[in-house]
Amino acid sequence: MSGVAHYGKILLFGEYSLLYGSDALTIPYRKKKVMLHFPYKNTSEELNQIAGHSNKQLQLFFKYLNSHKKDTATYLDLAAMQQDLNEGLFLKSDIPSGYGLGSSGALIAALFNRFGKQPYNRTDDHSAKALMRLQEIFSFMEGFFHGKSSGIDPLSSFLNHALLIKSGNKPETTDQIMPIFGDKSGLFLIDTKLSRKTAPLVQIFKEKSSDKKFVETLQQKYIPLNNECIDALLNGCRTFQEKFFSLSDLQLRYFREMIPEHFLQIWTQGLSSGLFSLKLCGAGGGGYLLGYANDLSGIDKKLQYKHIEEVLF
C-alpha cells in the first residue's frame, strides 16, 4: 500500500522578517515528496533497513503524540496509527533534510491525512477558521521536531497549495500568483548542495536583532520591500524585478552571515552585472537560493554553476 503524496514547500518571501510581522509567501515544491508505505514483499536488505529505520522514527513520534493523548486524541486516531506502525508502516521520502523544504512538515501532513479525525476536505475548505485550526494542530505536532513551530510547513504540504501569510501569522490560500515573466525571464532555484541546521542561523538573527539600527532597517526598509515583492508577484506588477533586486542588495548587506560563503561572489556578480539577482530561500546557510533573471537561457553558464532549475507555479 502506498499513501497520498505530500510535497515539500518553498518559502519565496518572508524568511526572518516573518518574526517581526511581515507577510510571507510559500508554494508547493512538487519535485520532492513523501508517501506512507507498508513494507514491500521480496525487497532488498537495504530497502528493508530503510523501512525499519523510518518505522522506528515514526514510533518515537507516536510516543510523543500519545504522551499528549488528552489533546491529540481529539484530532488523531491514535489506535489506528499504533496498529499501522506495528504492522511496519514507514515513510518514503526524497525531501532532503536541512534544506528548508519542509521535510518534517510533509511527514506530519501525510500522517494527518491518514489518521486525522477532523472532517476536513483539503481541496475545498480553505476558510480562515479551518486553516487556523489546522495550523494550531500542525504547530503542536511539529513541535516534536523543532520545538516552537508556526505550523506553516505542514499546512502548505497538507493543502498542496500556495499560502499567503499575512501579518499576525494568519495563513490564507491564494490562486492569485500572476507572474509577469516573459518568454525568457523568471525565478530560479540554486541548489547549494549544502545542508544546514536552522537553530544556529536563527540565533545569529536574534543576535543581530539586539542592534537597534538593524531592527530599524528591518522595520523601515526590509519588511516593506519584502511585502512589496509579494504584492508585485501576486498582482503581476512589472516593478517586481526592481524590488527583487533591491531586496537582494539588502540581504547581501544585512544577512551576509546567512549566505553560503562560496556564493557571495556569485551574488555580488549578479547585482553588479544586472543579469540576475539572488535572495535567501528560507533560513539560508545552505539548501536553496532563489534568483530572478531577465533571461533564464544559459543562466547556469552565467553563474558558472550547474545545479539550477526554474521555479514553476
Image (cartoon, helix red, strand yellow):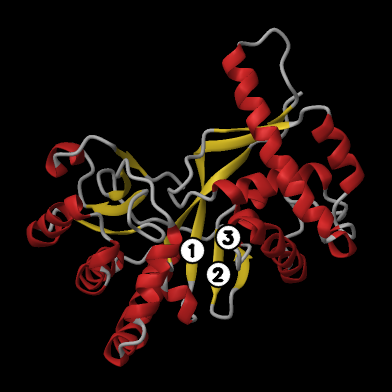
Which of the marked residues, 3 or 1, is nearer the chain's N terminus? 1
Give the Cα distance between marks 3 and 1: 21 Å
Q: Residue at x 62, y 22 (%)?
A: 49
Give the Cα distance between marks 1 and 2: 6 Å
Dot 3 and dot 2 residues touching (CB under 8 Å):
no
Q: Where is mark 3, residue-wise?
A: 146
Q: Which residue is drawn at 70% across and 32% down?
A: 90
Q: Which amino acid does label 1 sit on?
A: Leu
Q: Which residue is drawn at 65% across and 34% down?
A: 54
Secondary structure beneath dot 1 equals strand
Query: Disc number at residue 244?
Result: none
**Is residue 141 positioned above or below 42 on the image?**
below
**Is residue 305 positioned above or below 221 on the image?**
above
Secondary structure beneath dot 2 equals strand
Q: Where is mark 2, residue-wise?
A: 165
Say whether residue 154 is left or right of residue 248: right
Q: Position of residue 197 (x, y in %)?
A: 42, 55
Q: What residue type is labelled 3?
A: His
Q: Which amino acid does label 2 sit on?
A: Ile
Tag in front: 3 or 1:
3
Q: Residue at x 70, y 60 (%)?
A: 138
Q: Where is residue 89 in the image (x, y as percent from the top left)?
A: 76, 31
Dot 1 and dot 2 residues touching (CB under 8 Å):
yes
Q: Which of 135 and 194 is in front in this view?
A: 194
Secondary structure beneath dot 3 equals helix
Q: Where is mark 1, residue-wise?
A: 25
Q: Where is residue 91 in the image (x, y as percent from the top left)?
A: 66, 34
Say whether residue 216 is left or right of residue 175: left
Please indicate, yes or no, whether residue 228 appears anywhere in the rendered image.
no
Say whether residue 74 is left or right of residue 294: right
Give the Cα distance between marks 3 and 2: 20 Å
